[in-house]
Amino acid sequence: MTNKTSVPQAPKRRLSWNDPGFRSLIYQVLVLGVVGLGVWYLVSNTLHNLAVRNISTGFDFLHREAGFAIGESVIPYTPADTYGRAIWVGILNTLRVSVIGIVAATVFGTLLGIARLSKNWLLSRVTSAYIEVMRNIPLLLQLFFWYAIITEVMPGPRNALNPVAGVFLSNRGLKLPALQGDALDWILAGLGLAILVIIFLGHWARKRQEATGVIFPLVRVALGLLIVFPVVAWLISGASLSLDMPALKGFNFVGGINLSPEFAALLAGLVIYTSAFVAEVVRSGIQSVNRGQWEAAEAIGLPRGRMLRLVILPQALRVIIPPMTSQYLNLTKNSSLAVAIGYPDIVSVVNTTLNQTGQAIEGILIIMAAYLTVSLSISIFMNWYNKRIALVER
């Protein structure tokens, strides 16, 4: 005779108001329904009012000719292009200043945060004063200040400052030498390949160090690869490559790359303002590392630079990354203040578009969608990186 072990079955769930789960579901459905009704009322009321006033709706205007010029653009653009292309130019301009600003603010802010913790009394106090001053002056005022410095204080093109050969700073902006020729595509391909190799080398070096304790000189190797790969790609291509140096002709410079006063002022304001907050984030992250880690690194004879790079900063990153994400998002959204100094970002271009077309609602939706997409992309990447460096509990 065999004993059969009976498996207890879960009791059947009854739809009763006394069940907390059932009540919670009903409440959520009711809230969702109320929100849906509110959205439907607002949309239908808006469409009705627009129809009464004979105001057209929709995004068909994006295919019409824009008819206005844009001072600077990453891609070719003329007034004969469509509103859609004009808005795309504004988005790329916003991305350009945001990406460069994030990189520059991260590097500058990290250096400031480390300098504030320096044992050098003068360096620490000067850095602290800089951080406190820049954090407490509104960004808009800083943008006005830097724009006035460039356009009013800087000399004209004929008397432009020339700190380095081929670099000119005047009230027309910053002129820099530029590479031109058919070999540029090959050089960019070599640069991209070098970055991929560096990523794989970094992964391999970390695994190797964990297994053997031997440190691979990744920084020096990476710098070498970033130089060697593009040069080799250029030599293999056999294509032409030349350096276009800016030169003064008439009343302005020709050739090279031009950073307009608006772009330079916006970038300077964003970097200087955000780097002060980044410095505090880095400082707090470093100070969160237990003092015993410093003492252990000193006990094995590590110099201070290597101590920070190999022991302290990797642990501090777990505290630094979440608030750093907020600073990146703030910098990206603060770039919308560019309209105050005339830089053609997405807000400026869409403002011109909706003034010409009257499509105010669609224009605002485009701006909201653009910033939402960029902000979510930054958040997703930073959250992924935060999970990657998080401690794995056993």
Image (cartoon, grey):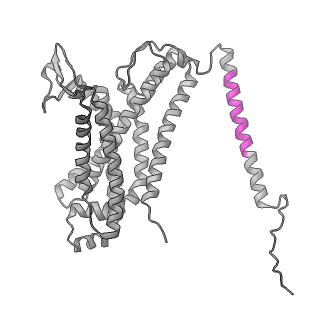
Q: Residue at x 20, y 27 (%)?
A: 242
Residues 145 and 333: in front is: 333
The part of the image, by quadrant, that contains residue 38 is top right
Q: Residue at x 41, y 27 (%)?
A: 345
Q: Is residue 63 above or below residue 306?
A: above
Where the N terminus falls, by quadrant?
bottom right
Q: Residue at x 47, y 24 (%)?
A: 87
Residue 137, position as x, y percentages in the image? 33, 40
Residue interval drawn in magenta = 31-47
Q: Please indicate whether residue 338 sits to the left or right of residue 121 in the image.
A: right
The part of the image, by quadrant, that contains residue 88 is top left
Q: Is residue 120 magenta?
A: no
Q: Residue at x 23, y 55 (%)?
A: 115
Q: Is residue 311 above or below residue 2?
A: above
Residue 35, position as x, y percentages in the image? 70, 40
Q: Is residue 35 magenta?
A: yes
The outermost residue toward the bottom is 1
Residues 322 and 230: in front is: 230
Residue 273, position as x, y percentages in the image? 32, 41
Q: Please indicate whether residue 34 sits to the left or right of residue 177 in the image.
A: right
